[in-house]
Amino acid sequence: MTTTLAATGPSSRSRLAQYYVLTKPRVVQLIVFCAVIGMLLAQPGLPAWQPALAAVLGIWLVAAAAAAFNCLIEQHIDRRMQRTAWRPTAKGELSTAQTLAFSAVLCAAGSAVLLFAVNALTMWLTFATFVGYAVIYTVVLKPLTPQNIVIGGASGAMPPVLGWAAVTGEVTLEPLILALIIFLWTPPHFWALALYRVEDYRRAGLPMLPVTHGPEFTRLQVLLYTLILLAATLLPFTFRFSGWIYFAAALVLGAWFVVLAWRLWRDYSDALARQTFRFSIWHLSLLFAALLVDHWVGPWLFAG
């Protein structure tokens, strides 16, 4: 959808489509997916469907609000970057007032759903995630430090914690380990993108790591983070809240991520950086899917 919309002018894109694009649908889908995994792992059986559905809706609304606010704050930067110049705020299709109102309504609606239909803990954690991404990361960290992705990754790591809190009303070690995995996954994921989009970031004046420290240093960091990430992905098995199905999937997925990072470090090409970035998305999605399969199938498969 985004490719199609990028090629169209303001007159051919409906107002509804403009607002929809502001929510960064693919990013929000991954956030909601990780939150749902947190819900499903939080207890042996299926969670009650009404609060679970309300949690999905509330988390989606607040995450979409954060995405829209990010587009608002970065509209001047987005105009200078090829991969973001098509956004409605960058093209002037939506005004500052319209975007701000849209973000505020989504955030308020999502927070209300979480407070009244789920629980207060989930509402406050989700709102804190909104502040962490939309304000601390977008406004403060991103334009000031090349470690923006590392520090700001804390807010992006929260979805499993949100899902877990929605079902149990508390935060325990298990969702924090899942958050740690996402936290460590974020830098190699984004730096792989930054490597082949480095000129975009340079034109935008953003201090991304390839701009401030060069591509060779960034490639080394990608490799080091994938190694640490591989170790972190084994923690669910180590702490006994996953079994052999997940363990095998984590090893295979993590090993291939390391292989791609090694090749990226030793023999760089933009094509390989794109491949690494795309695989990183599959890595996280399949890793969490393996957790779910292990949770439901593992006890039956290895019973006795």
Image: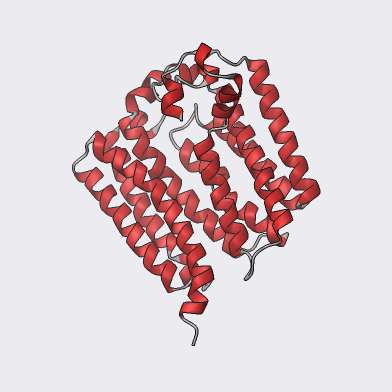
Number of marks: 0
Q: Quadrant of residue 199?
A: top left
Q: Residue pushed farthest left?
A: 267
Q: What residue sits 60% from the left and 16% below the top?
A: 94
Residue 219 appears at what percent x and percent y? 29, 41
Residue 226 appears at what percent x and percent y? 36, 52
Q: Residue pushed farthest bottom?
A: 304
Q: Quadrant of residue 139?
A: top right
Q: Quadrant of residue 271?
A: top left
Residue 220 appears at what percent x and percent y? 29, 44
Residue 39 appears at what percent x and percent y? 62, 58
Q: What residue sits 66% from the left and 38% below the top?
A: 61
Q: What residue sits 32% from the left and 52% below the top?
A: 257
Residue 205 seen by the camera: no
Vertical placement of residue 288 versus 245, above or below: above
Left or right: where does residue 51 sit relative to residue 235? right
